[in-house]
Amino acid sequence: MKKILAMLLAGMMVFSLTACGGNSGGDAAADDNSASDNNTPAADEGDTGASGEAGGTFKIGGHGPLTGPAAIYGNAAKNGAQIAVDEINAAGGAVQFELNYEDDEHDPEKAENAYNALKDWGMQLSLSGVTSKPAEATSTSHNDDRIFALTPSASSTAVVEGKDNVYQMCFMDPNQGTASADYISEQSLGTKIAVIYQNDEVYSSGIYERFAARAKELGLEIVSATTFTTASQTDFSVQLGEAKNAGADLLYLPIYYTPASLILTQAKGMDYQPKVFGVDGMDGILTVEGFDTSLAEGVMLLTPFNADAEDERTKSFVSKYNELFGETPNQFAADAYDCVYAFKQAIEQTGATADMSAEDLCEKMIEAFSSMTFDGLTGEGMTWTDGAVSKSPKGMVIENGVYVGMD
């Protein structure tokens, strides 16, 4: 009987060990399937996250106006980011990306809905919003959820203020205002300046406030400063009449391209032809449906991107964009392209892996962006301080229907 019991116990132990071995294999298979679902390359495909090297497929989300009057901006950013993602993925490195853009229609409430949809999708890194008000609306959510955000073009100070994990690739509004005043003064572009800005749009009013302050410091004479709102951006006869009567020889427009196109059209009807100087929001005026682009001849603006630049990287990007989308990319597309490559550099610099939680990945990105230097289409030697980027603007002028760099 003792021998029989001993044999039974031994058999049970063998069975138990075999069963445990089978479960272990099943768990490993489940882990492999999980990695596959997350598009994370296996170790022999270059994922060496365990040894501290970056690897995996990271989910990038973004929201912007893909429809509506500001759709030129949103689609440009989406297209530029997609080109960067496709290039990086085609190169076959350890770091790969998946991109998802949601339409916010340039509306803060819809931006919150877009953000929640992206979070449910599994967004790990964010391009935030394309325009300022929607980006402001979701910046608090990014901060609360600890999802790192790098917006290509939302330039209001409120987007980054009080959030240690929300950064900008574009110029901050105050910086555009200061740079515009400096450029106008240095180039002696006008002796009497009139300004028309949108007082219910943080982008426009923020630029104007800093421009006015800097203009005063430089001794630039602002002879007229008039405003409009979203509801009144169809008739600019009063604003233009005041500028003309004041003898303004330079019209400064810190506004988006849609109202700018109407201002130029109505100025012609009044036989008023001052020099016109704008900011990056006017990039896109040549693509406004029904607009006589000859009216934009000679318009000057500050932008971080020159599509006519002769360096190989810019030429390649412009060529791909033209081939895919049938038009020349604007600075919104270039800034979004740079955002994706900046993410790649930060991931590689810190050894981040795609299986990290959003919170852990966020800390890695903060570590990288607060210390790294980045070269892109929109600037060389870019650095960040408190979320704001430091890079030099480029003066552009529209000649023969294209943007040309100014000396």
Image (tube, grey):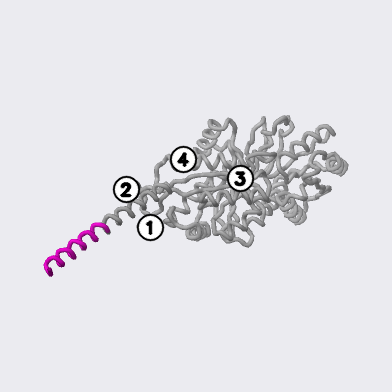
Q: What is the magenta range?
A: 1-19
Contact flag, marks 4 and 1 (Cβ < 8 Å):
no
Q: Find out whether residue 55 is within the magenta segment.
A: no
* Mark 1 vs 3, N-terminal side: 1
Q: CA distance from mark 2 to mark 4?
A: 22 Å
Residue at image mark 4: 87
Residue at image mark 1: 52
In the image, taking residue 288 as reference, residue 376 lies left or right, namely left
Tell me where residue 72 appears, x and y as whole percent: 64, 38
Residue at image mark 3: 304
Specify the farthest residue to the right: 245
Q: CA distance from mark 3 to mark 2?
A: 41 Å
Q: Residues within 10 Å of mark 3 (few under 14, many from 20)?
A: many
Residue 44 circle label: 2
Tell me where residue 251 appears, x and y as whole percent: 78, 42
Which is nearer the eye, 158 or 17? 17
Q: CA distance from mark 1 to mark 2?
A: 15 Å
Specify the farthest residue to the front: 1
Q: CA distance from mark 1 to mark 3?
A: 35 Å
- Tag 2: residue type? Asp
* Mark 3 vs 4, N-terminal side: 4
| Label 2 residue SS | helix
- Tag 4: residue type? Glu
Tell me if residue 27 can be seen.
yes
Contact flag, marks 3 and 4 (Cβ < 8 Å):
no
